[in-house]
Image: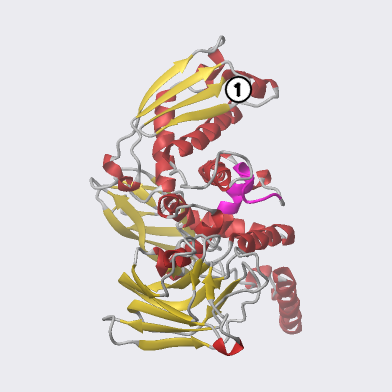
Amino acid sequence: MKKTVLYSIMAVMALLVSCQKEEEFSIEHLQTPLQARFSVDKSRVFISEEVQFTSSSIGANKYEWSFEGGQPSTSSEENPIVSYTSAGTYKVSLTVKDGAKQNIIVKEEFITVYGEECWKDVVLPAVNFKNTAADKNLYEHIVPDPVRLIQTACFDVARWLFVCPGEMDELHTIDYTVEDNDGISAKGGQAPRINIFFSATYLQNCKEKGMTDAELLAEVKGVLYHEITHGYQFTPQGAGNYQQGDDFFGFIEGMADYVRYVSGYLTTGDRNAGGHWNDGYKTSGFFIDWLHTKNQNFLNELNHSAKTINPWSWEAATKKITGQSVQVLWNEYQQDIESGKIEEIDELLRRMRAGEDVDFGGDDVSESLVDITDQNPTVTYQSEEFDFFDWGLPEFAYDNDPATAFFNMNNTTWYTFETANSFKINKVAITATANILGIDYVFTPDEFVLYGSNDGENWSEITVVESTGIVSFEERKEFVFENTDYYKFHKISLAADIEEGDNKRIMIGELELLGKAE
């Protein structure tokens, strides 16, 4: 399309000029647009760490950089390298010129430098390295300083997974062994001490397949970053066993291959369509990458969800982080691969990781909806007490597990949620239960009213839904509405239509109140 428009403009200009004075026409009359653009290899660094700035400007032949707090503070290079001596958040600007024309881009609070209180004082694990292979030479040739390589990988992986070291389970010791083994690599143990083996046999096989020294080093690093991720990532609670196809497996191996990819040791050529989000490794890893289009802090929140959701599942985690079902997200991801849209998304994700502000056409981190039932609220409720369904507890309505059910013998009930922060609720989601009773009737609320309050006594009506329309077991339905007010207390009153008979009760598999923090 762009080429067609350009050719059309050229044709018109050529015609106009030829009518006046044909010999004066020159292609130089077409002005190249001038646009300042740049990215970085990292936007969160610690004191004295170098940042590589790369210009992707259009039409520029002169560059004037300004680095607030940086050394150097200015530069005329196209792709300068800068470091910072003090903790803080700093602005960067780039002015590009082409003759008399110029264009400027300014990025406020673009570089975050961590000082003594954060990554500057991170404690890296001690490394006990052994090379027990019969032929030690190849690994020693490829990796002359293995301890430094392992500790560098620890630092890089930790910064992918966490914002600051205070979030981490401290890892004190890594026992790393190179040995003759038919496998590739594996991690054992848990923080604070883990062990990793790497196969000298595998490395030799890679060399015999024609891999260069640089390719061999990249393979060693890629496997190492994968295993180090296992050392730092949290363990999802109640997510089953380490078995392919389980939620646990998809989380553990998918996250590790995602970190391997963004660290530069996998490429999009390793991605394939199809499979399942629980397949782990590259399949789950590239899905995690794509999920950053829904929440740009997805990896960090996914890792922390392993501690906050019990039992953990992909369904519960994606709903909490993005407000959407994992099956819906997976289907959209597959469609993006099949349509070719994934290539555009890859570029946006690359720019996002380089620190650029990007728009994925949806909510960014600050706009992501949060389920307030997951924010450790103080909960009160009204329901009829009974003792013959011990599984029908009121708490089951907001436990992130649709398989558990709240059952109320009365035709009305209500919940109030008091949160530490104020929230603006714009969506309610209700999930019907599974057919626990073995019946053919779905006991769901027919209607509900949502209220807000800042003192827990004076309530304002936020929305009324007169017909939920939920008719199937396990059906999840979302109700989206306009709301501009923030409240610390939210009350939802649910009712069943008793005009259809006195057998109308209420059962809920999951109740979600989704909104944005003030």
- The reply to whether residue 54 is visible in this rendering is no
Using the image, determine if residue 501 lies above or below residue 409: below
- The reply to whether residue 495 is visible in this rendering is yes
- Left or right? Give the position of 414 relative to 314: left
Q: Residue at position x 62%, y 48% from top?
A: 278
- The one nearer the camera, 23 or 517, is 517
Q: Residue at position x 58%, y 31% from top?
A: 219
Using the image, determine if residue 425 lies above or below residue 304: below
- The one nearer the camera, 322 or 465, is 465
Residue 30 placed where, x, y %?
Answer: 64, 72
Q: Quadrant of residue 170?
A: top left
- Left or right? Give the position of 106 relative to 206: left
Q: Which residue is mark 1?
A: 203
Farthest residue toward the front?
388
Q: Is residue 276 magenta?
A: yes
Q: Residue at position x 36%, y 88% from top?
A: 460
Q: Quadrant of residue 328?
A: bottom right
How packed mark 1 is, by other alpha carbons closer than 10 Å (few <14, some 14-19, many 20 or more), is many
Q: Is residue 284 magenta?
A: yes
Residue 376 placed where, x, y %?
Answer: 35, 63
Farthest residue toward the top?
134
Local SS, label 1:
helix
Quadrant showing the C terminus: bottom left
Residue 101 placed where, x, y %?
Answer: 48, 70
- The one nearer the camera, 114 or 287, is 287
- The three-letter code of the residue at mark 1 reads Leu
- The one nearer the camera, 131 or 422, is 422
Using the image, determine if residue 448 lies above or below residue 141: below
Q: Which residues are magenta?
A: 275-288
Q: Residue at position x 35%, y 33% from top?
A: 192
